[in-house]
């Protein structure tokens, strides 16, 4: 039974993470900070007071809840954590320390704000735990030094991570730019083979027609001569343009094979099955011939999407390839029910998606790719057809 599932943006489809204002990682961080602070508070209160105050435990857990929104409003979250910490200091007569919730809140502020804001946040994080302590205004020197050292370590760690992230992002952009350039060169080579073949055929046919139609009216002869000259000039200009795009490429040692198209999708689907990914091909609408360049784009999208599915979907996953012929274009959908999104294959992240998007944009289309709410990954490309392309070939 072929799989049917709505594409991204269709009614009833919702991306993961849209239902809640926080992510799963934020929830795990908040729970972890609450557990660490609760264990520390329990041990300290048992040692200092001889019992564990229930109200203090509640405030300790509640002080970590604002971390759920730390990515949306880091400054407000840090302020809320500090205020709840001060309330805990005023409620429980025992020395307080630099909590895990304050650590996470300060780290998030330093990661996302300017140095001046980060410095002010660090000072607040140092002063906050001291407010309301029973030994104030002269807290133990060890507590003060420990709080300052903890804040400095958090600021240093966030600064180092920021620098590493900037370097990694710059490296990623560089690789993405190289991938785009390489894909454009590849597209140019493939289009060269297609366009050169048709223009050469046009030139030969025009020359042959001119030679056999000598007895026809002069107007027809002149039209054929013009056609031949235009074809020769277009071929020469196309070669010059693509020579520039191919600069730095190694010369092809063997003649290029005919470029694949929609008729070759059965072969790609069969290869996916042999590789362990059960795949079905569905065709909807009235099948009709497509321009060679558009057929090549469809083939490459399906090929790349199935390759990504085999890499990321995991064992036991299935895939479906669906071609939908519309009056004004063609829609290509490739979906799987594996764990591609959990494995890190997200929208725009892979160079395969960059290549797909370049090909679709070349035809004036649109590409959408991302995880499905019920699991798996979906690639959808809409390729419009011009009035000339809609005509039978």
Image (cartoon, rainbow, N blue to C red):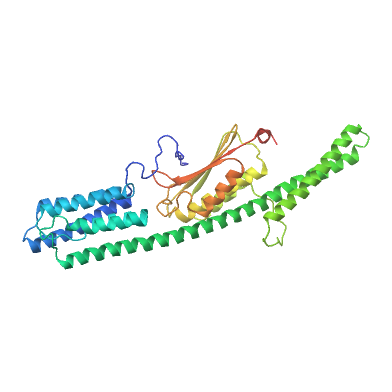
Task: Using residue 122 as the reference point, say whether residue 292 is left or right of it.
Answer: right
At x 53%, y 58%, the residue is 174
Residue 108, relative to residue 327: is it above or below?
below
Task: Using residue 211 as the reference point, say whether residue 375 is left or right of it.
Answer: left
Q: How many marks?
A: 0
Name the residue furthest right: 215
Task: Locate residue 92: give its quadrant.
Answer: bottom left
Q: Quadrant of the C terminus?
A: top right
- Residue 130: give x, y in percent of width and height: 17, 58
Task: Locate residue 101: give its quadrant.
Answer: bottom left
- Residue 46: give x, y in percent of width and height: 9, 61
- Residue 230: give x, y in percent of width and height: 80, 42
Name the residue furthest bottom: 142
The one of 184 and 275 positioned closer to us in this rendering: 184
- The answer to whether residue 27 is visible is yes
- The answer to whether residue 63 is visible is no
The one of 162 and 194 positioned closer to us in this rendering: 162
The one of 111 and 180 positioned closer to us in this rendering: 111
At x 90%, y 37%, the residue is 213
At x 74%, y 52%, the residue is 240
Task: Using residue 327 as the reference point, say whether residue 250 is left or right of it.
Answer: right
Residue 283, relative to residue 71: is it above or below?
above
- Residue 75: give x, y in percent of width and height: 30, 50
């Amino acid at each position: 039974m072929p799989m049917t599932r709505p594409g991204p943006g269709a009614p009833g489809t919702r991306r993961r993470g849209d239902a809640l204002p926080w992510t799963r990682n934020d929830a795990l961080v908040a729970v972890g900070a609450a557990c660490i602070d609760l264990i520390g508070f329990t041990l300290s209160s048992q040692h200092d007071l001889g019992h564990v105050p229930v109200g203090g435990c509640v405030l300790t857990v509640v002080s970590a809840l604002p971390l759920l929104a730390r990515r949306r409003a880091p400054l407000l979250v840090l302020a809320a954590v500090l205020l709840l910490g001060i309330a805990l200091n005023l409620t429980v007569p025992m020395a307080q320390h630099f909590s895990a919730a304050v650590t996470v809140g300060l780290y998030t502020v330093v990661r996302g704000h300017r140095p001046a804001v980060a410095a002010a946040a660090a000072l607040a994080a140092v002063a906050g735990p001291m407010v309301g302590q029973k030994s104030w205004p002269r807290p133990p020197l060890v507590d003060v030094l420990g709080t300052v050292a903890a804040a400095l370590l958090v600021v240093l760690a966030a600064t180092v991570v920021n620098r590493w992230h900037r370097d990694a992002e710059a490296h990623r952009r560089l690789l993405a730019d190289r991938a785009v350039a390489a894909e454009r060169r590849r597209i140019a080579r493939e289009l060269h083979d297609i366009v050169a073949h048709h223009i050469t055929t046009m030139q030969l046919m025009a020359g042959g027609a001119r030679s056999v139609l000598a007895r026809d009216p002069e107007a027809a002869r002149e039209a054929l001569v013009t056609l031949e000259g235009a074809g020769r000039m277009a071929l020469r200009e196309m070669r010059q343009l693509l020579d520039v795009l191919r600069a730095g490429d190694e010369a092809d040692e063997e003649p290029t094979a005919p470029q694949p198209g929609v008729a070759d999708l059965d072969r790609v689907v069969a290869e996916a099955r042999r590789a362990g990914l059960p795949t079905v091909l569905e065709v909807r609408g009235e099948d009709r011939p497509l321009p060679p360049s558009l057929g090549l784009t469809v083939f490459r999208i399906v090929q790349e999407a199935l390759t990504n599915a085999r890499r990321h979907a995991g064992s036991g996953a299935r895939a479906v390839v669906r071609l939908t012929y519309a009056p004004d274009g063609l829609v290509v959908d490739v979906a799987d029910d594996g764990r591609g999104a959990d494995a890190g294959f997200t929208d725009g992240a892979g160079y395969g998606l960059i290549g797909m998007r370049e090909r679709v944009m070349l035809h004036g289309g649109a590409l959408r790719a991302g995880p499905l709410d019920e699991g798996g990954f979906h690639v959808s490309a809409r390729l419009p057809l011009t009035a000339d392309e809609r005509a039978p070939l």
